[in-house]
Image (cartoon, helix red, strand yellow):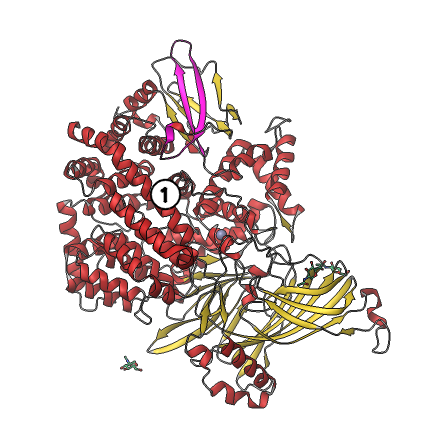
Amino acid sequence: MPAAAEASMATAEGGLTKPRGYQVTRTCAFLLACLFLIVIASALLLMYLLAPCPCARSSGLAYSRLSKKSNLYVRLPTSVVPHSYDLKLIPFLQPGNFNFSGNVDITINVTQPTYNITLHSADLSIHTTSVRRLPPAEDNDIVSDASPSAEVQIPIRKTEFDLKREFYIMHFNQRLEPGQYKLVIQFAGVLNDALQGFYRSSYVSNNVTSWIATTQFQSTDARRAFPCFDEPALKAKFTIHIGRPEQMNTISNMPKSGPSTPVEGIRGYYWDHFSESLPMSTYLVAFTVSDFDHYADGMFKVWARSSAVDQAKYALSIGPRILRYFEQYFGIRYPLPKMDMIALPDFAAGAMENWGLITYRESTMLYQEGVSASRHKQRVGTVVAHELAHQWFGNLVTPSWWTDLWLNEGFATYIESLGVEVVEPTWRTGDQFVVHDLQNVLEQDAYKSSHPVSAPVSHPNEIDEIFDSISYGKGASIIRMMDHFLTTPVFKRGLTNYLNSRIYGSASQDDLWEALTDQAHADNALDPDVTVKQIMDTWTLKTGFPVVTVIRNYDTGSAEVTQKRFQYVNALNAQSTDWWVPLSYTTQDRADFTSTRPSYWLKARSSIVIDNINTNPNRWVIFNINETGFYRVNYDERNWQLIINQLRDRDRFMNIGELNRAQLIDDSLQLARAGLLNYSIALNLTTYLSEELAYLPWEAALPGLGFLNTMLKKMPIYDKFKGYFLNLINRLYEETGFIDKHTDEQLLIYKRVEVLRWACALGHEDCVKNAVLQFQHWRSSPNPDKNNPVSPNLKSTIYCTALREGGQAEWDFAWERYLNANVGSEKALILQALGCTRETWILSRYLHRAITEASGIRKQDTATVFDTVAGNIIGRPLAFEFVRDNWQKIKKFLGPTVFTLSNIIRFTTSDMITEYELKQLKEFAMTKGEQELGSATKAVDQSIEIVEANVHWMKNFYKDVELWLQSVKY
Ligand SMILES: *[C@@H]1O[C@H](CO)[C@@H](O)[C@H](O)[C@H]1NC(C)=O
Ligand SMILES: *[C@@H]1O[C@H](CO)[C@@H](O)[C@H](O)[C@H]1NC(C)=O
Ligand SMILES: *[C@@H]1O[C@H](CO)[C@@H](O)[C@H](O)[C@H]1NC(C)=O
Ligand SMILES: [Zn+2]
């Protein structure tokens, strides 16, 4: 699924997603029942349409959720499987009537005798149900009503809802024998505003509000739109019909099968009929009703509201090419006759890979040249490629259960960078993967509260929790590792075999391991006595990853290589571990940074000795070429010193490959943070950065230095740190300059953006002056919504700096622009910048607006506001106090869109570093308790662990850093 919202998730999809768990209140259910009666009495329907419905007006939905980690068994009985669905739905899109009514015919196979049929339904009122036994297929042509082989109605004894399991159960007096049956269910529901199931979205244009009905079903919300067997392995064919007002259009997974037909009894409504789909999972079903416009390129279409559809051209220019590339990559044609992509004004996640109809939030699909930043263009490319990759990995072959979600998401996240590389080769997205995805998740996976990528889950709450950067980023990183140790041709052949053998079906990780093992053995890529499963189980079933320590014996030329779990607290006492670690390395003489095949393995052993590493004692060795292995590397002090000497040689530091320079910086700073390496060594290594101009090493360095910035920001040594940091970026600042040129390469632009961001944040005089000036130009421009002189790439720094330096006038100006912006990326950007002000009361007003209906901030963006306010040193305590004191109100505002809650917790606590803050956080957790924290419970636990580690750091390492900063000369 879905790419994370803009906010701060580094991985493509990750986090910001999942709403969950509400049900229709009794009154509403009753009203819905009335609705249904009216629907069938079609003559009265128009009256109904005009009458306001109390369900939708008061938000009418009572929040209820199931207790976490319940032992409730939530899987469906296996005696019945769905064969095909014929689904008819009519959504109504008027204030006062956001209901929908529907009918579903499900052909099922009873595989074992049973007295009941159980399927999923949530928040729906079900009006009538009937069950018929179908004659055996071969008798079809001799069927007559009188013949014994005709369809037979089966009386239903009673029906019931199991609310906890979200089941709808039909009980029978007679035993249903194996065979084919047809269920017919009529039902109704409410188009909710919680961005899940079948929901409504809206936008305003020329002062007129237009409504949209759309869907988001992953993971378990198809059951909120129609009764169904809502498990990923229960694939079936879908024939869909959607009723819509005359002037609107509908799209679904498949193309239309014929002309639209009038809806009987509802004037001005038409049925759109769609062709039968291939066998697919319920969570991939999608349909939308809107007044959007589109552009097309052959079978490929992009949709958006008419005033934004121009912004979809970039997505349309790359989408078809990426799709064709994936056809080659997987060796399997895209099996559907068309592809639609649609940008929705309200969307909880980043995007969703529904088969043949990919849904996006506006900011992940729309790109406006001259308004959106280049970084944003990459984001669009990445998300488009990610969702297209899912059309094979996830849609064609689907994980049997959510435990294997990581396979889906890990693959899509890895392969997205390969897809983008094809259409935008100069961006080097494959290399960027290392500094963005891999290094980011190495940090998160070092905490105990992390989880294995393959996590046993059952309940919907637990399923939601694993849509995180571990599943995405670590999943992708270990797949990349496999690509390298098997070598790409072997890896791709194995992959194609796996997909072909499971096509239209489902599979688990073991099935993939088997296909890859067979291929690896056939191609001699792996010892015959070693399997991919053996290796990969150590990476998927356990939490964390190893730090590999290489201790050279300079007399004998040998080296001992050991592994331990990497963690920030108590790292020295961490247990030795048994991962299968592929070891690639090079030496100063060879300096070969292209060959990533492992020359040794740590075969689930805690250590090995390499007898001869083939270099002389005064030459360095570097392990983990291009950081293709998912681990960190530590060395003895002498080898570190040899590496530092090389890096500090301004003419020859480039002998070490760019990705490995990035690796050395990241590893050394993180090892020091964990107490495994003396801070003076790590910091000495960073001194070479004053000569470094390449993008990737800087992208590795900035988060590491950013961590120190957070820790030192309130400490007396901060001016020294600032001075050192500014000195490091000085040359880069000179090189990139403040002027953003149209012709600049993407990576140069990124460098400029990053260096300006830090320079301005650290108070670099020239930077701040420039930023404020450019913002003034914008303010004094005659029509600032149309004429913005600020270069798109520099907007984030310029807005933020100007708002930080300015007061209410600047803030209010930016807020106006936010409200008027027509481009999603611009809105997202201003939203971030609005948190930069130093005026406490404005920050407070901003937080209040984030949880106020109709303030102009959409629910999908609430967490971003907390993120930016908490990222501001002045806003940090404010944001936390606000969350603590307004918890109930926030929960109520977000309603069932609870996933946002977890992000709010993460964002508002991640920079806490003092004992006092830790105490406050723990008190918060205790007084609220699991009951009130609800879905944010896990996030609170994780936050406590992170803050504890920060506090631990201050106690143990602050002094070392202070000492080093006092003595460093530059
Ligand atoms: C259901 O049964 C029919 C007839 O026996 C068979 O053709 C079909 O493949 C079965 N479908 C499923 C999903 O088991
Ligand atoms: C429905 O039948 C299945 C067996 O086919 C059984 O396991 C399950 O418990 C039954 N459910 C109920 C609610 O009776
Ligand atoms: C938009 O509508 C509101 C109320 O419906 C009205 O007060 C306002 O003047 C309108 N604005 C424009 C630009 O038409
Ligand atoms: Zn995905």
Instruction: Read off the residue under disc 1.
Output: 945
Q: Is residue 380 above or below residue 918?
A: below
Does the stretch in magenta take in 840?
Answer: no
Q: Is mark 1 within 8 Å of ligand 4?
A: no
Quadrant of residue 355 within the rendered picture: bottom right
- The part of the chain drawn in magenta is 545-572
Q: Is residue 189 left or right of residue 794?
A: right
Residue 788 appears in the rendering: no
**Placement of the C terminus among the 4 image quadrants:** top left
Q: Nearer the viewer, residue 838 or 653?
A: 838
Q: Is residue 257 above or below residue 297?
A: below
Crowding near the residue tagged with mark 1, few <14, some 14–19, many ≥20 C-alpha atoms within 10 Å:
some
Quarter of the image where ligand 2 sits: bottom right
Q: Is residue 564 above or below residue 310?
A: above
Residue 530 appears in the rendering: yes
- Across the whole image, how many numbered discs are drawn on residues? 1
User: Horizontal and vertical percent for residue 565?
Assistant: 44, 31
Task: Tell me the SS state at disc 1.
Answer: helix
